[in-house]
Image (cartoon, rainbow, N blue to C red):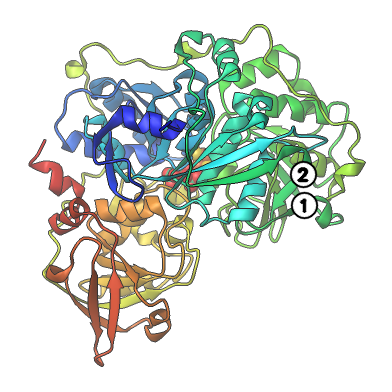
Amino acid sequence: MGLNITEKIISAHLVDGKMEPGTEIGLRIDQTLTQDATGTMAYLQFEAMGIEKVQTELSVSYVDHNTLQMGFRNPDDHQYLRTVAAKHGVVFSPAGTGICHQLHLENFAKPGKTLIGSDSHTPTAGGLGSLAMGAGGLSVALAMAGQPYSIPMPKVVKVELSGKLTGWATSKDIILHLLGELTVKGGVGIVFEFGGEGVKTLSVPERAVITNMGAELGATTSIFPSDENTRDFLKAMDRVEDYSELVADTDATYADTIKIDLSKLEPLVAQPHMPDRVVTVKSLAGLKVNQSAIGSCTNSSYSDLKTTALILKDQQLPQGVDLMISPGSKQVLKMLASEGFIAPLLDSGARLLECTCGPCIGMGGSPTSAGVSVRTFNRNFEGRSGTQDAKVYLASPQTAAKLALAGEFTDPASWGTPIEKIDFPAEVPSIRHLFIYPPENGAEVELVRGPNIVPLESFSALPDEISSEILLKVGDDITTDHILPAGAQITALRSNIPAISEYIFSRVDENFVSRMKNSESGIILGGENYGQGSSREHAALGPRHLGVVAVIVKSMARIHRANLVNFGILPLVLSQKSDYDRLSEGSHLTLKTTEITPGGETVATTADGLQIKVKNDLSEKELAIIIAGGLLNYVGKQL
Ligand code: MIC
Ligand code: SF4
């Protein structure tokens, strides 16, 4: 029987397990990436493993999130990241060089390779045929140490594209369409593999927009074949030698097939505050726009920004409309500059920001109170922009630029002739000399650790019995931004767990931390899709530091669940969802952890004798990790 692309890569990297959906598999990891906000922790953990040199083919450490450097914290973190990279054989990308996923696509990703990154949008590299997954920092540290990466074998769903995009529709509208159809829970346990005639009409940067935002579907990852367009892209990047063809066998099978006729799509937006609240742009005509932001790891490629410049050329933004543009990399910026596209951007009144995540992670660029901001990003969670009551809409660069110019939502039928598809210029400048490559022998490199780098805490093993109160009850769709908000002030504390833990759930319930501090331990009760969004392991580490022993929910997001396991917190699921209503904040639960079996059901008893059945989907190894008090304790003896 033939294999699909996902199965081909998995079978070539399979170290443990069988390719049966749902069962645990271990994969050999070729490449890793980290970014600064999750990276400091990942390298502290790597150091704790006592391995001299990374065991992967390539590991890269990017600095793109926390680049404001207000005070000593961020620059100290960056200095630590630079020295620890040199010491252990990791390539380092300094602040301002670009956004990790855009840089990785341009410079390092290869078809057929496995990549894990401590950032949930690592699947961006699926646009050129890598099997690229987001993971917690500790999982990435382990992969750097040469250990396999464990995941449940995903189901592979084919997304068959036919036809061709027309009018003002873009690849962003393909993924927004999918999000509208499948919702933010629609991809759990799934790899979306793109195929069909329509694939040929999409360039690698267009494909990467789709695989990037596939993360918002909750998918394990998304992947495109590696074909002539991939070859063209790698050639433009001056690394055609990295090309290899990778297509599904003609008799490959899939768990399911979703069909999309590209010619039927029109410009779409995701409304506040979820990426799946998708409607057509025209249906919102008349809604005033205060701000647009073009950039982020989703839409900051050369073609995205040149299109933007062509739309803004000889136009002037209306007074009071703020338009921010962040190129994805210095390569993109240099191409725009050499082709004369910076002046049209500046002359329109737009602001050119650094090549970083910027406003996407709340590093500046917050909208006005209750303002409407149209952003080309992948997330619009409440408060993430830094303005709690702002309304963020997610759209393509074309849509964001057109709506900024109009100062309101308009019908794309009135936008005139669409911008033609953009190819790379004949000469693509290289920025590869800006990366800092590690020396052959890192032993002599001196590690520099500023006061913001706080040593790792060691956690104790799981007690035989949990006897704790539910100290927080939350509803559905709690994101990691709810658990641990982003923004300059908080993100600067990513290497300091005691300090950052003060902000756990701070925007949901300001008394949660003090309730935790007044108790030995606590339980969190959640609804559906708990922990969706980012890969930040601080959303597990912080609660663990405060004494959370178990999270009991209706359902949970993949990366957050893995992070809970890594730090020894029990991820439990209510067997009867209706029990959610029988429990409240303050309910006391007793549960014998010695009775927990992998994939089994256990009973938790309330103070008044109510029996609540909870199940888990833990593998034997995951359970052993939790019992040991987390992954570092578990592997400590084995490495
Ligand atoms: C995000 O978009 O939320 C982030 C910041 O890139 C995160 C990682 C983090 O919290 O550091 C992600 O998506 O994984
Ligand atoms: Fe950076 Fe935003 Fe992408 Fe996260 S989603 S990596 S913050 S640009």
Q: Nearer the viewer, residue 49 or 634?
A: 634
Q: Does mark 2's beta carbon lie closer than 8 Å to ligand 2?
A: no
Q: State the image quarter where residue 539 is shown.
A: bottom left
Q: Which residue occupies 56% across, 45% down?
A: 257
Q: Which residue occupies 84% across, 44% down?
A: 319
Q: Which residue is mark 2?
A: 267
Q: Nearer the viewer, residue 257 or 631?
A: 257
Q: In which quadrant is the C terminus drawn? A: top left
Q: Amino acid at mark 1?
A: Thr
Residue 275 in sight in this render: no
Which is more N-terminal, label 2 or label 1? Answer: 2
Asked whether, in this view, residue 566 is left or right of residue 583, the answer is left
Circle 1 Cα neighbour tier, 10 Å, few/some/many (<14 / 14–19 / ≥20): some
Q: Is residue 156 above or below residue 5?
A: below
Q: Amino acid at mark 2?
A: Pro
Residue 208: where, in percent of width, then height? 57, 32
Asked whether, in this view, residue 465 is left or right of residue 283, the answer is left
Marker count (numbered): 2
Residue 538: where, in percent of width, then height? 35, 51
Residue 281: where, in percent of width, then height? 79, 50
Q: Nearer the viewer, residue 557 or 305?
A: 557
Q: Which residue is mark 1?
A: 280
> How many angstroms separate mark 1 from mark 2 (CA)?
6 Å
Q: Which secondary structure lies at badge 2?
A: loop
Asked whether, in this view, residue 36 is left or right of residue 326, the answer is left
Residue sticking out furthest to the bottom: 608
